[in-house]
Image: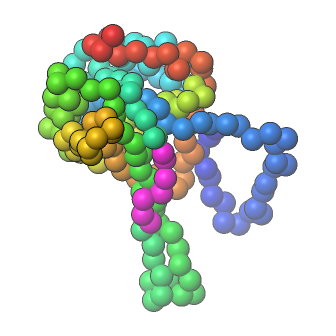
């Protein structure tokens, strides 16, 4: 996918609908990196080898992978809009959209809980997410997310403890979500947890 270019003087375009829509799946893994970190990406979105190299890297360029991510959803969180007297015709204009990745981190041990909560030291992180169909979202640079992981939640009898996830990022309306697909993303492992 390429960035969206807006030509207000041109005509709107629309391709024919595909016979079968792509099944992008749902988020089931997250890759997190220091806010100043960079992943070496040759194309618009990272390849499996580039993600594996980031996981094996050190320092601010190291990606940590959260594997046991369940109930993953990507939804709109909020919109920044102008309306009324702020627009020439009084209609609403969408200025930006905040998107969120939500879910739960399960199958936790004491060390893993501490490691996950350590990322709260950084109010911002770069994030890529991987889906149940082997797609990687986040493009070249990842999404800069507002970061906070809640401590362990234990709801009671029959419910395993979990850490809820709610990562918010601002979607640039002039850009598409660059995505790559590789079945190898389905079996990505964080070396520290295997």
Residue drawn where x is 54% and y is 53% of the image: 174
In the image, residue 51 above or below residue 12: above
Magenta span of residues: 73-79
**Image position, residue 72 (x, y; %):** 46, 40
Q: Is residue 144 visible?
A: no
Rendered image quadrant of residue 118: top left
**In screen coordinates, is 60 left or right of 143?**
left
Residue at the spot x=40%, y=46% of the render? 102
Quadrant of image for the N terminus: top right
Tell me, yes or no, whether the highlighted magenta stretch contains residue 75.
yes
Q: Quadrant of the C terminus?
A: top left
| Residue at 71% in and 66% down | 9
Q: Is residue 18 above or below residue 93?
A: above
Q: Nearer the viewer, residue 9 or 69?
A: 69
Viewer-nearest residue: 54 or 13: 54
Instruction: Indicate left or right for 53 with 108 as reference.
Output: right
> What x and y, as percent, mark residue 130?
49, 30
Q: Position of residue 142 (x, y in %)?
A: 41, 35
Residue 182, position as x, y percentages in the image: 59, 20
The mark tally for this picture is: 0
């Amino acid at each position: 996918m390429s960035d969206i270019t807006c030509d207000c003087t041109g005509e709107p375009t629309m391709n024919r609908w595909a016979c079968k829509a792509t099944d992008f799946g749902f988020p089931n893994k997250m890759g997190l990196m220091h806010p100043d970190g960079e992943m070496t990406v040759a194309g618009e979105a990272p390849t499996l080898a580039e993600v594996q190299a980031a996981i094996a890297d050190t320092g601010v360029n190291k990606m940590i992978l959260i594997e046991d991510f369940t109930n993953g959803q990507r939804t709109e969180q909020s919109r920044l809009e102008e309306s009324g007297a702020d627009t020439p015709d009084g209609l609403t204009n969408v200025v930006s959209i905040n998107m969120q990745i939500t879910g739960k981190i399960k199958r936790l041990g004491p060390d893993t809980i501490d490691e996950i909560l350590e990322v709260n030291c950084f109010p911002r992180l770069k994030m890529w997410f991987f889906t149940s169909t082997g797609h990687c979202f986040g493009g070249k640079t990842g999404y800069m997310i507002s970061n906070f992981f809640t401590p362990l939640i234990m709801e009671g009898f029959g419910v395993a403890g979990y850490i809820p996830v709610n990562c918010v990022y601002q979607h640039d309306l002039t850009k598409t979500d660059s995505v790559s697909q590789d079945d190898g993303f389905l079996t990505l492992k964080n070396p520290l947890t295997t």
